[in-house]
Image: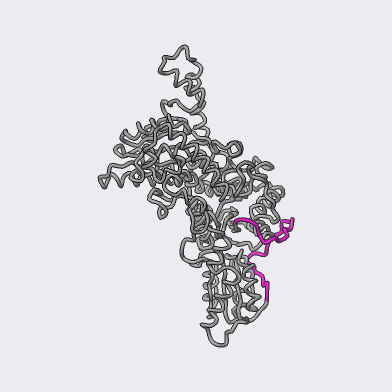
């Protein structure tokens, strides 16, 4: 039996000798690589936290002591060491382990952190709760350097420093990467800590001029470049006792340092330097490629995928470059998701018009507003779930001032393996209630391109939502033609039942319509809604059905209900969409089917409703 097989909880980990911990790290890294290669998931970030995870669970009395991981995609070693090793083959699959910490999955997952930069706030709350309750336990926030770019992290640091009697440690996991390459002044500051005069002087003095106690430190610095102390830092100005940087892969440095910090009172800050992809040369060389791979052979590495259909992200990336070539006012913005949002080619072709603002969605939205104030036409590429973080800025800074900002909302609807934390289920509801907004949902790749042009040419805030992954295989027109504003189209003429489909639900609605001989409208616009088309279909059909890949409450179906009410039209209305619950991770198409949003499910819901209506409403079988 290997050491790893003997560890089912951190208490067993703490019985190992220090020499055995190094062996455990090697076994854990090997198991992690082999496991993720079989299931897909986050790899580079987890390879970089193996020793840090071991050290934290070895020194702190978890779960009594609380550890909050930020961002949560670096917690696979934590999951393996806290009794979930045998469930790793189910990672990110329906009914299996989440790819992020979940409070209902394990008592060791103290806080859900699939969105970044929340750990310090949560850990401070836990520390002050312990103080209030008279409990002698520690709170630890492990925050990645990318997550430190968000304003919320600094808001929390500003608050932490005023409490001098709490047992709290902030661990900065500095791996010089978030997902995309690092940006911003903080990254440059951390780089200076690693290459400043203090280090250079310590290294260049040489062994002959140092006392024996310092020679080992100098030697370790030469070997690791991560073992010295910095006299004063930005973090000390916040009231935290700063230690570091230290080598995050050296257990002989990590464990004694953590033990010393554990015995100190007041808020502590430990700067740990790790390497993303540590121990797997391919991931070390290209941590972005190996950030969240699918299944692959570890001995061969990731092979180029054979893609037969274009992804919506590629459609956006191509459109962005084409429109930028035509209109020099266009600028592109991403909050640290260059690869995920399809902006790599845009950065290469238009570097002076490309802005990566880091993991800072609030700033991204208001930054776009500032650009728009000066006559530029910003396009903010952002996942639907992340725009939630800039909602006040969207209302106050963009829409209220009716500024010309285009929002490209990737990952709208269900996202599969990433689950509820990343699903874009709410944008239709939270956008359509905002004055001045135009809101569109693409039904295929070509329509996505047309909508992006429509939104870009609209002189105000506009959002285009599109899903993760490939489209239906529609041919994409290379032109930059817009759609007529606020106009839907009738795609199929049937009888009795009219299905009003929004975005990705057009294809399954067409399938259901074939089973029922129903009419189908591709509504295209959620706002402004094509009220005339709604009224026309209501006048010629007995049942109106709305279908959307978003929450029913306040969504596109609600917009149709409001339009009918405003026109004084009384007509049976069936609203289909995502249920009022958080939908877990799994295969996206299977999840949609379980929500009744495939062709068979839509047809079944309409038949069930038809049987409850008047006898004259009988749909064809």
The quadrant where residue 470 appears: bottom right
Q: Nearer the viewer, residue 143 or 108?
A: 108
Quick one: which residue is furthest to the front in this view?
A: 1
Residue 492: horizontal and vertical position, in percent? 68, 74
Quick one: which residue is furthest to the right in this view?
A: 478
Q: What is the quadrant of the C terminus in the image?
A: bottom right
Can residue 81 be seen in this snapshot? yes
Residue 81: horizontal and vertical position, in percent? 43, 44
Q: Nearer the viewer, residue 82 or 194?
A: 82
Q: Residue at x 43, y 26 (%)?
A: 230
Highlighted magenta segment, given as a residue range: 468-492
Name above or below for residue 232 compared with residue 498: above
The quadrant where residue 549 appears: bottom right
Can residue 389 be seen in this snapshot? no
Quick one: which residue is furthest to the top in this view?
A: 208
Dominant SS type (magenta): loop
The reply, left or right, for residue 25 in relation to residue 376 is: left
The reply, left or right, for residue 142 in relation to residue 369 is: left
Q: Say if the magenta span includes residue 449.
A: no
Name above or below for residue 459 compared with residue 596: above
Residue 98: horizontal and vertical position, in percent? 48, 53
Name above or below for residue 173 compared with residue 569: above
Q: Say if the magenta span includes residue 491.
A: yes
Residue 217: horizontal and vertical position, in percent? 44, 21
């Amino acid at each position: 039996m290997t050491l790893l097989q003997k560890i089912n909880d951190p208490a067993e980990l703490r019985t190992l000798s220090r020499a055995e911990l190094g062996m455990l790290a090697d076994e854990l890294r090997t198991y992690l690589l082999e496991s993720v290669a079989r299931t897909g998931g986050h790899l580079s970030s987890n390879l970089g936290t193996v020793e840090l995870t071991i050290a934290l669970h070895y020194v702190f009395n978890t779960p009594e002591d609380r550890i909050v991981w930020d961002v949560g995609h670096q917690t696979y070693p934590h999951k393996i060491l806290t009794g979930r090793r045998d469930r790793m083959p189910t990672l990110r699959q329906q009914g299996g382990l989440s790819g992020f910490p979940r409070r209902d999955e394990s008592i060791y997952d103290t806080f859900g952190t699939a969105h970044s930069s929340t750990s310090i706030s949560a850990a401070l709350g836990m520390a002050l709760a312990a103080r209030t309750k008279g409990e002698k336990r520690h709170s630890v926030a492990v925050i990645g350097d990318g997550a430190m770019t968000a304003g919320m992290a600094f808001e929390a640091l500003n608050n932490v420093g005023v409490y001098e009697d709490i047992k709290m440690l902030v661990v900065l996991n500095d791996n010089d990467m978030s997902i995309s390459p690092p940006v911003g002044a903080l990254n440059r500051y951390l780089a200076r800590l690693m290459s400043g005069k203090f280090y250079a002087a310590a290294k260049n003095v040489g062994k002959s001029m140092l006392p024996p106690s310092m020679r080992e430190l100098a030697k370790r610095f030469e070997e690791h470049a991560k073992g010295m102390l910095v006299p004063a830092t930005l973090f000390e100005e916040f009231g935290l006792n700063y230690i570091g940087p230290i080598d995050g892969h050296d257990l002989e440095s990590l464990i004694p340092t953590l033990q010393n910090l554990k015995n100190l009172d007041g808020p502590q800050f430990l700067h740990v330097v790790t390497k993303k992809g540590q121990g797997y040369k391919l991931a070390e060389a290209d941590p972005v490629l190996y950030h969240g791979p699918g299944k692959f052979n570890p001995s061969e590495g990731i092979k180029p995928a054979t893609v037969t259909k274009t992804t919506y992200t590629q459609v956006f990336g191509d459109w962005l470059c084409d429109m930028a070539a035509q209109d020099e006012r266009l600028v592109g913005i991403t909050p640290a998701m260059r690869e995920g949002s399809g902006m790599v080619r845009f950065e290469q072709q238009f570097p002076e018009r490309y802005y990566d603002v880091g993991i800072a969605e609030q700033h991204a939205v208001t930054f776009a507003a500032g650009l728009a104030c000066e006559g530029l036409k910003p396009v903010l590429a952002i996942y639907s779930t992340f725009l939630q973080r800039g909602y006040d800025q969207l209302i106050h800074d963009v829409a209220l001032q009716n500024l010309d900002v285009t929002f490209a909302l990737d990952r709208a609807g269900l996202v599969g393996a990433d689950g509820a934390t990343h699903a874009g289920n709410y944008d239709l509801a939270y956008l359509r209630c905002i004055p001045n907004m135009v809101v569109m949902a693409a039904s295929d790749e070509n329509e996505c391109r047309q909508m992006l042009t429509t939104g870009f040419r609209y002189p105000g805030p506009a959002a285009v939502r599109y899903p993760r992954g490939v489209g239906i295989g529609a041919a994409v027109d290379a032109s930059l033609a817009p759609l007529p504003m606020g106009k839907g189209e009738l795609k199929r003429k049937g009888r009795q039942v009219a299905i009003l489909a929004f975005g990705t639900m057009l294809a399954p609605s067409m399938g259901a319509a074939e089973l029922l001989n129903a009419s189908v409208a591709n509504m295209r616009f959620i706002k402004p809604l094509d009220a005339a088309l709604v009224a026309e279909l209501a006048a010629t059909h007995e049942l109106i059905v709305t279908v959307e890949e978003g929450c029913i409450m306040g969504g596109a179906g609600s917009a149709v209900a409001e339009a009918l009410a405003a026109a004084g039209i009384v007509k049976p209305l069936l609203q289909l969409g995502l249920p009022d619950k958080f939908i877990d991770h799994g295969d996206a198409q299977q999840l949609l089917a379980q929500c009744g949003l495939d062709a068979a499910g839509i047809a079944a819901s309409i038949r069930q409703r038809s049987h409850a209506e008047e006898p004259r409403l009988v749909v064809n079988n």
